[in-house]
């Protein structure tokens, strides 16, 4: 499965904490913990977009990893 585009609304749901998933990819888990705190402290559109861009980039960079593939299946089906 390829990484869905950044404009997919599920990315914003993840970084705002509206949707939570049990993730396998450690780098994403660590990054997500930080960006959710940042976005919840200041939920501006710019912060949400920045958080989505960061999370998307981590998944794009590591798209070949088995744990990334599992995460994408869990999140996007």
Image (cartoon, rainbow, N blue to C red):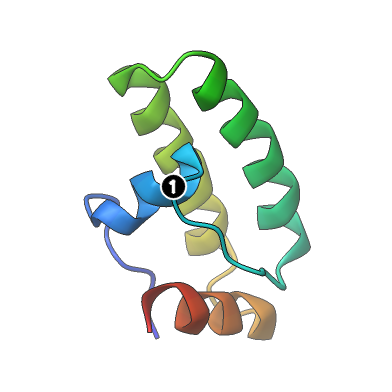
- Quadrant placement of the C terminus: bottom left
Mark 1 — residue?
18
User: Element type at marker 1?
Assistant: loop
Q: Position of residue 5 (x, y in %)?
A: 27, 59
17 or 63, nearer to the observer: 17
In which image quadrant can residue 44 be found? top left
Quarter of the image with the N terminus in it:
bottom left
- Residue 19 in picture, x, y percent from top left: 46, 55
Q: Residue at x 58, y 35 (%)?
A: 36
Q: Residues within 10 Å of mark 1 (few under 14, many from 20)?
A: few
- Residue name at image x 56 percent, y 15 percent: 41
Q: Judge whether 2 appears above or below 33 on screen.
A: below
- Please indicate whether residue 38 sits to the left or right of residue 10 in the image: right
Q: Residue at 25% of width from left, 53% of height from top?
A: 9
- x%, y% of residue 46? 33, 19
Location of residue 4 by image quarter: bottom left
Horizontal side of 11 relative to 36 (left or right) equals left
Rendered location of residue 54, percent (x, y): 50, 40
């Amino acid at each position: 499965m390829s990484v869905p585009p950044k404009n997919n609304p599920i990315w914003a749901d993840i970084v705002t904490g509206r949707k939570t998933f049990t993730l396998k990819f450690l780098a994403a888990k660590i990054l997500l913990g930080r960006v959710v705190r940042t976005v919840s402290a200041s939920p501006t559109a710019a912060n949400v977009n920045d958080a989505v861009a960061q999370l998307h980039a981590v998944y794009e960079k590591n798209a070949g990893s088995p744990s990334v593939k599992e995460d994408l299946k869990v999140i996007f089906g």
